[in-house]
Amino acid sequence: MPIASIDEIRARIGDEIGVSSWLTVDQPRIDAFADATEDHQFIHVDPQAAAMVGLGGTIAHGFLSLSLLSRMAADAMLLPDGMKMAVNYGFDRVRFIAPVRSGQRVRGRFILDSAEEKAPGQLLLSHTVTVEIEGEDKPALIASWLGLIFI
């Protein structure tokens, strides 16, 4: 993760602060997520059945695409010098826009919306994250994501 001072982070509010590398969402990843969440709906795990309903094959779970934000953030989010830990603080808004088909690649585009002191030694960061699908006009999702940084 890119490191910056708190002043440098605050100076970037309203800016795109980073774009992650591409991640492949292949069938083994989708199947592993289905196993972990016990969500084995056919549109995720049965390519033939998914094709018969017009999907052209299986699609990733929306929550799988959302869960990849943690990995994407490692490439893109600015974190302050001397950070002790960071925790997921939740989402103000999440919208799933377009399905991610098995085999497609996705990446996250991060805009820093705010950086507020929540308590002494705690910085609450809000990002708008757009998960793009390679070669597609519509993104997989757009989220307003909160992270609490302990410094």
Image (cartoon, rainbow, N blue to C red):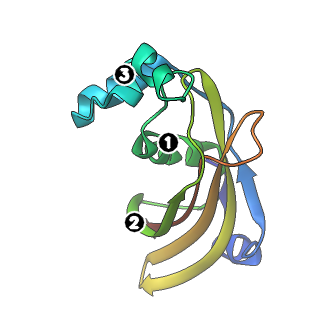
Residue identified by numbered label 3: 45
- Crowding near the residue tagged with mark 1, few <14, some 14–19, many ≥20 C-alpha atoms within 10 Å: some
Residue ID at (77%, 45%): 137
Residue 108, image x and y in percent? 65, 47
Q: Quadrant of residue 107?
A: top right
Image mark count:
3
Which numbered disc flags the more N-terminal residue, 1 or 2?
Answer: 1
For residue 150, say whether it is visible: no
Residue 136, image x and y in percent? 75, 38
Q: Amino acid at mark 2?
A: Gly
Q: Amino acid at mark 1?
A: Ser
**CB-based contact (under 8 Å), mark 3 and mark 1:** no
Question: 79 above or below 122?
Answer: above
Question: 116 above or below 57?
Answer: below
Q: Is residue 126 left or right of residue 2?
A: left
Which numbered disc flags the more N-terminal residue, 3 or 1?
Answer: 3
Q: Quadrant of residue 24?
A: top right
Residue identified by numbered label 2: 90
Which numbered disc flags the more N-terminal residue, 3 or 2?
Answer: 3
Label 3 to label 1, Cα distance in Å? Answer: 15 Å
Secondary element under disc 1, as helix, strand or loop, is helix
Residue identified by numbered label 1: 65
